[in-house]
Image: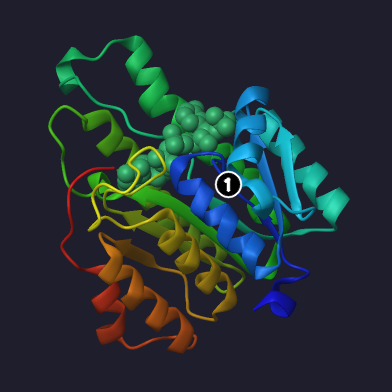
Amino acid sequence: MTSEFSDRRVLIPGGTGGVGEGVVRAYLAAGAQVVVPSRDERRTAEFQRILGDAATDRLHLVVHDYTGFDGAERLAAEMAERLGGIDDVVAPIGGYWGGRRLWEIDAKDWQDAFVGLATTHAAVMRAVVPRLGPTGTYQIVAGESGFRPVPGSGLLSMQQAALLMMRSVLEAEVADRQRVFALVLGPVRTRSIGDAQPDWITPGQIGAVAVAASASTVAGREIRLPDPDAAKQALALLRDGNSRPTTKSAEAVSSRPGNEEG
Ligand SMILES: NC(=O)c1ccc[n+]([C@@H]2O[C@H](COP(=O)([O-])OP(=O)(O)OC[C@H]3O[C@@H](n4cnc5c(N)ncnc54)[C@H](OP(=O)(O)O)[C@@H]3O)[C@@H](O)[C@H]2O)c1
């Protein structure tokens, strides 16, 4: 895998987060050049510390605000100029929101949990897609709440549903030029969870699926990852599949019932 990925340039906005950590580690271990932007200098330093020896010179941690159209455009332009292009994007941007029913939200909730995050995803997408190489992948990370309502967390559900539709539209629009995936997660055993919840999917398993999607020729799709078993199935599909896998194997990956959050 290392030689195959040695020239691959991967952008991971949201890479400093709990899910992002597993994705960053997986691409670094595969040999890629990995760009991780963060809005916060302290968070960047903390992430470097968390990665330890995994933070090789192929990791490019940059303090950069990409949450608006101009900032995302500058990020993509600088990455393309410095590394010579962009091959893959994996976007685990944004975390949990909850605690209020839909009619209880205020203007700040609406801005933070819906408008702000939707804008950030759209900004990255519009800056990067025209620059993605022909074998590239665009991978959106979302949660099952995008298709399963979670009372008290409705803004998150609405925003995740919008992301899943963004993937579908994007796939239709880029046609055969690039592959667009959504990794749709159940609850994740991030570093803040520690060893609790052994049945939850881990960031490492999610990262392995993302790398396998980049390495494969399987067509873009929604990949549901409710738990570790689903991650194993997804890896089998991505590693063994070719450009148009059978409906049966695609269904095995994309229609498993899952847990709840995210
Ligand atoms: N954790 C779970 O159990 C779970 C389950 C299902 C789905 N998911 C999905 O996985 C993705 C990542 O979740 P996570 O748990 O890794 O979240 P997290 O730990 O809170 O990390 C979120 C990342 O997004 C970045 N970000 C950029 N713009 C943001 C904004 N406007 N608001 C908040 N964060 C922003 C942050 O980067 P900087 O602060 O460094 O700039 C941070 O690295 C989300 O789409 C989430 O819905 C997670």
Residue at (73% x, 66% y) in the render: 8
The residue carrying mark 1 has its beta carbon less than 8 Å from ligand 1: no
Reading the image, the residue beneath label 1 is 125
**In the image, farthest residue toward the left:** 151
Q: Residues within 10 Å of mark 1 (few under 14, many from 20)?
A: many
* Quadrant containing the N terminus in the rendered view: bottom right
In the picture shown, does residue 247 fall above or below 220? below
- Residue sitting nearer the eye, 30 or 215: 30
Image-based side of 198 in relation to 21, left or right? left
**Observer able to see residue 5:** yes
Q: Amino acid at mark 1?
A: Met
The image shows residue 62 at horizontal and vertical percentages of 73, 36
Q: Quarter of the image holding residue 154? A: top left
The image shows residue 187 at horizontal and vertical percentages of 27, 48
Image-based side of 48 in relation to 221, left or right? right
In the picture shown, does residue 19 fall above or below 205? above
**Observer able to see residue 162:** no
Tell which quarter ligand 1 is in. top left
Residue at (15% x, 21% y) in the render: 101
Residue at (24% x, 26% y) in the render: 98
The image shows residue 43 at horizontal and vertical percentages of 60, 28
- Residue sitting nearer the eye, 8 or 149: 8
* Count of numbered circles on the image: 1
Colour convention of the picture: rainbow
In the picture shown, does residue 175 fall above or below 159? below
Residue at (32% x, 54% y) in the render: 185
Image-based side of 4 in relation to 202, left or right? right
The image shows residue 168 at horizontal and vertical percentages of 40, 58
> Helix or strand or loop: what does disc 1 sit on?
helix
* Quadrant containing the C terminus in the rendered view: top left
